[in-house]
Image (cartoon, grey):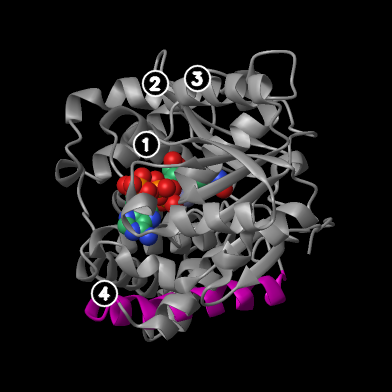
């Protein structure tokens, strides 16, 4: 096991009706003037936004609001939010929505008290300070409710890049599984794929003997394989929604990652797809991750065989673990197909002729050094090959 630090101070409030307590938590974490940030309208249609406002008003808190965050959130709205915070004297940013809304809120919170261009953070500068952020999560997916990360797309050049830093880890996150019951099945499945991908990014590692973390990863994956089909069949299944919602947090606050090297190249490779074609991040991962697995499996077939046995119930072929490993990858792919995810490039609207440019951009564009990943270090040609395997 590698040395590590783990500090995950977000205050989680989980369960039915908990959004009614938003005002209390904003006050507790020091807010007096709030920016309520949200997406394209789902929180208005569900009545959630009104309930949140009522809760703030109940605590005598002032607020301004900014909606319109798009999936794969853009820099333009972040600049607008930063201006609004400065002009209005906002001291707390409240995200009401999914990962895109939370990430946009984090970017605004960091940019509002930073003298330079907020994009500096998305080119590698750590975010040490930001206005406090609270979240009310409406989709189990990105894990941004418990992570110190934010992913934004710069409209100029459509660079989708991540920033990180303890300054943007949410002060509190309210997780009410009921709020996810209005999700279309496709978005539920995209979110589930992202959650599983967050675990796989950590599972495929060169670090040895991290049994505890392996087993935690497997617990999250087994939970997803059990609960996602139940939710697709019955969108109002509260218990299954609840398990998935907490799995999404555990998958990405690094509980499943400590003590080991992590990979993350599938995420970097996917981010080009969601930047260029504006597909859902989870859908892009459904296409890329199995291709990445096929491309890297020979680096450590036993690692892939282990998860094939423990997650998908494959029989171990001791003479040739590669066979087991490949069966596991196929099982993952068919699971994704069974929950309605795309499994090929074309289904995303992606085009073969764009591959060289996307590979170049993922390895060299805007702050990148030429290679991706750590389980297997990938250069531009490898990334091109993975895109082609996904065709
Ligand atoms: O915008 P609205 O109208 O709210 O609709 C959203 C959006 O269209 C809809 N939705 C959300 N909750 C709903 C709902 N519709 C009905 N009922 C509800 N309860 O779902 C759509 C997708 O929302 P979005 O916020 O984009 O989803 P997600 O949480 O998957 O976030 C994706 C973004 O997070 C980034 C991704 O790259 C992508 O940009 N990631 C962020 C990470 C982080 N900050 O730690 C890590 C991840 O790996 C990921 O990269
Ligand atoms: Zn992700």
Mark pair 3, 1: CA separation: 26 Å
**Nearer to us: label 4 or label 2:** 4
Mark pair 4, 2: CA separation: 33 Å
Indicate which disc, 2 or 1, sits on the residue closer to the N terminus: 1
Quadrant hosting residue 109 = top right
Mark pair 4, 3: CA separation: 39 Å
**Nearer to us: label 3 or label 2:** 2
- Magenta extent: 209-235
Secondary structure of the residue carrying numbered label 2: loop
List x then y, in percent, for residue 152. 50, 31
Q: In this view of the protein, can residue 253 be seen by the observer? A: no
Q: Which residue has dot 4 on it?
A: 232
Q: Which residue has dot 1 on it?
A: 70
Answer left or right for 59 relative to 79.
right
The structure residue drawn at horizontal position 42% and vertical position 21%, both measured from the top left corner, is 361
Q: In this view of the protein, can residue 167 be seen by the observer? A: yes
Indicate which disc, 1 or 4, sits on the residue closer to the N terminus: 1
**Nearer to us: label 1 or label 4:** 1
Q: Residues within 10 Å of mark 3 (few under 14, many from 20)?
A: some
Q: Which mark is residue 22?
A: none
Secondary structure of the residue carrying numbered label 1: loop
Q: Residues within 10 Å of mark 2 (few under 14, many from 20)?
A: some
**Nearer to us: label 4 or label 3:** 4
Q: Which residue has dot 2 on it?
A: 158
Q: Which residue has dot 3 on it?
A: 364
The structure residue drawn at horizontal position 80% and vertical position 47%, both measured from the top left corner, is 30
Magenta stretch: includes residue 271: no
The CB of the residue at mark 1 lies under 8 Å from ligand 1:
yes
């Amino acid at each position: 096991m590698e040395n590590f630090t783990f500090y995950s101070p977000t205050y989680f409030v989980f369960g039915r009706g908990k959004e009614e307590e938003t005002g209390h938590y904003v006050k507790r974490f020091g807010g007096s003037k709030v920016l309520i940030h949200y997406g394209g309208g789902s929180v208005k249609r569900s009545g959630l936004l009104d309930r949140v406002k009522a809760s703030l008003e109940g605590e005598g808190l002032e607020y301004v609001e900014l909606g319109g965050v798009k999936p794969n959130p853009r820099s333009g709205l972040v600049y607008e939010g930063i201006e609004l915070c400065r002009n209005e004297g906002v001291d707390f940013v409240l995200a009401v929505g999914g990962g895109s809304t939370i990430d946009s809120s984090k970017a605004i919170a960091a940019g509002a008290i930073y003298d330079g261009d907020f994009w500096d953070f998305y080119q590698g500068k750590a975010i040490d300070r930001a206005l406090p952020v609270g979240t009310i999560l409406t989709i189990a997916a990105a894990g941004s409710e418990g992570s110190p990360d934010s992913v934004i797309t710069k409209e100029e050049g459509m660079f989708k890049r991540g920033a990180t830093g303890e300054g943007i880890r949410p002060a509190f996150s309210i997780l009410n599984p009921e709020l996810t019951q209005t999700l279309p099945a496709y978005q539920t499945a995209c979110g589930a794929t992202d959650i599983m991908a967050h675990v796989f990014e950590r599972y495929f590692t060169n670090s040895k003997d991290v049994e505890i973390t392996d087993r935690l990863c497997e617990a999250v994956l087994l939970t997803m394989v059990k609960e996602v089909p139940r939710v697709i069949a019955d969108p109002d299944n509260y218990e299954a929604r609840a398990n998935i919602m907490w799995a999404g947090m555990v998958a990405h606050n690094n509980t499943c990652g400590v003590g080991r090297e992590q990979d993350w190249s599938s995420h970097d490779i996917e981010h080009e797809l969601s930047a260029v074609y504006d597909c859902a991040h989870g859908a892009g991962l459904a296409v890329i991750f199995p291709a990445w697995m096929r491309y890297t499996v020979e680096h450590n077939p036993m690692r892939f065989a282990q998860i094939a046995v423990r997650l998908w119930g494959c029989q171990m072929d001791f003479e040739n673990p590669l066979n087991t490993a490949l069966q596991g990858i196929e099982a993952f792919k068919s699971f994704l197909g069974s929950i309605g995810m795309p499994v090929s490039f074309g289904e995303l609207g992606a085009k073969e002729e764009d591959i060289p440019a996307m590979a170049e951009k993922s390895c060299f564009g805007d702050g990148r050094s030429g290679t991706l990943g750590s389980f297997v270090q990938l250069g531009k040609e490898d990334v091109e090959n993975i895109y082609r395997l996904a065709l």
